Image (cartoon, rainbow, N blue to C red):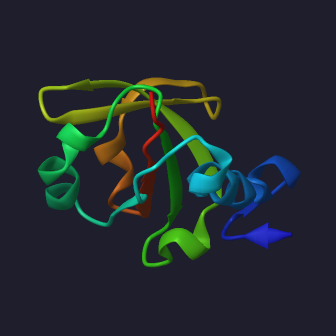
Amino acid sequence: MENGDFLVGEPWRLAKAQYEYFSDSSQGFCSSPSLLFTSSQELSEKTKLIQPGDLLFTSPKGTGIEGIEHATIVTKVENGHVYITSHSCPKLDQDAEDFLETSDLTVVRIDG
């Protein structure tokens, strides 16, 4: 399956299924609605709602939740910035804001 300029393998296609599972309150992981961010301003306004351990999903700009194709985890929230870690090109504590030019971000707030 092609998506843009790269081949999307099975683990990437499962990111949407992961989102649906973890965001379903009946599974017991979260009791709050997911947060969708399409701009840096939106993200900075709600940074205080996000904590390490929350899940952050990316989708191509303008596709929102329906376009989810990658999963990451929030590893740090400092000075109004949300940092994520993922296995791609390994990224450790990358500022989530770096993705907002080309991606929408959806956060599932994990209870606990």
Q: Height in image: 73 above or below 49?
A: above
Percent coordinates x, y for residue 96 in the rendering = 35, 42
- Residue 58 in picture, x, y percent from top left: 51, 55
Name the residue: 78% across, 54% down: 14
Q: Residue at x 43, y 78 (%)?
A: 62
Residue 33 location, x and y as percent?
A: 41, 59
Nearest the camera: 23 or 44?
23
Residue 84 in the image: state x and y as whole percent.
43, 32
Q: Residue at x 31, y 39 (%)?
A: 50
Where residue 19 sits, quadrant-wise, is: bottom right
Quadrant position of the C terminus in the picture: top left
Residue at x-position 68% and y-position 65%:
5
Q: Is residue 44 left or right of residue 14?
A: left
In this picture, residue 72 sits left or right of residue 83: right
In the rendered view, does 79 fall on the left or right side of 103? left
Q: Is residue 106 left or right of residue 13?
A: left
Within the image, what quadrant is residue 36 found in? bottom left
Which one is in front, 3 or 32? Answer: 32
